[in-house]
Image (spheres, grey):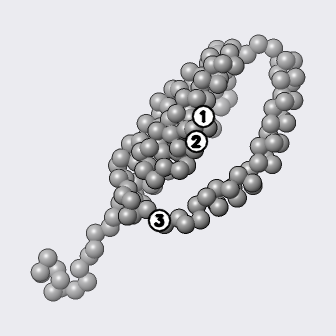
């Protein structure tokens, strides 16, 4: 997972970055499988690998960005390190929270895939659909922004000669 994440961040070629993201998502599904959570592992593969990565690859290949069109980023690694320093306290807080959660879930009882599916498609269907529309609109927006606009002739002489 770490190798895929590093490859995703450091590659200049967008397709290779997407492959790094793919490796990371498959690794996350493997982590779920190792934790005996087969439903989450399969859902991770179906949703993240099957939908998000494929849609990202479609967008990347549609946009077809070239090296000369990419922005120059001389301080890229400084920004990455600053981001890591800013995110680390929240990660530690999340880790400490996750250490407490198993005690809370022991009182709930058994949760199987049938219960998860029922909750996802009854109480959580609106956030699920909002997220899917948000992802779709982000991909369409990326394609629209990346398209080059044609230069319009300014006067009548330019129109006649073109």
Label 1 environment density (alpha carbons within 10 Å; few <14, some 14–19, many ≥20): some
| Residue 157 percent location from the top left of the image | 15, 86
Residue highlighted by disc 1: 1
Label 2 environment density (alpha carbons within 10 Å; few <14, some 14–19, many ≥20): some
Residue highlighted by disc 2: 5
| Residue 7 percent location from the top left of the image | 53, 44
Of the numbered discs 3 and 1, the one sitting upstream in the chain is 1
Is residue 62 positioned above or below 52 on the image?
below
| Residue 85 percent location from the top left of the image | 75, 54
Q: State how far apart marks 3 and 1 are (Cα).
A: 27 Å
Q: Quadrant of residue 77?
A: bottom right
Residue 71, label in figure: 3
Q: Is residue 26 visible?
A: yes
For residue 43, side relative to residue 93 (left or right): left
Callout 3 touching callout 2 (CB < 8 Å) = no
Frontmost residue, 4 versus 59: 4
Is residue 110 positioned above or below 129 on the image?
above
Could you tell me which secondary element the residue under label 2 belongs to? helix
Callout 1 touching callout 2 (CB < 8 Å) = yes
Q: Residue at x 36, y 47 (%)?
A: 61
């Amino acid at each position: 997972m770490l190798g895929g994440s590093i490859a995703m961040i450091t590659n200049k070629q967008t397709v290779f970055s997407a492959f790094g993201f793919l490796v990371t998502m498959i690794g996350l599904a493997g982590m779920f499988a190792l934790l005996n959570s087969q439903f989450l592992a399969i859902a991770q593969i179906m949703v993240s690998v099957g939908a998000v990565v494929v849609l990202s690859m479609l967008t990347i290949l549609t946009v077809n960005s070239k090296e000369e069109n990419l922005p120059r980023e001389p301080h890229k690694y400084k920004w990455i390190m600053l981001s890591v320093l800013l995110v680390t306290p929240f990660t530690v807080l999340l880790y400490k929270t996750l250490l407490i959660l198993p005690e809370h879930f022991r009182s709930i009882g058994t949760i199987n895939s049938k219960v998860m599916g029922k909750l996802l498609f009854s109480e959580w269907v609106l956030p699920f659909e909002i997220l899917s529309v948000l992802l779709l609109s982000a991909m369409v927006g990326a394609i629209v922004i990346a398209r080059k606009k044609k230069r319009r002739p300014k006067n009548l002489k330019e129109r006649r000669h073109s």
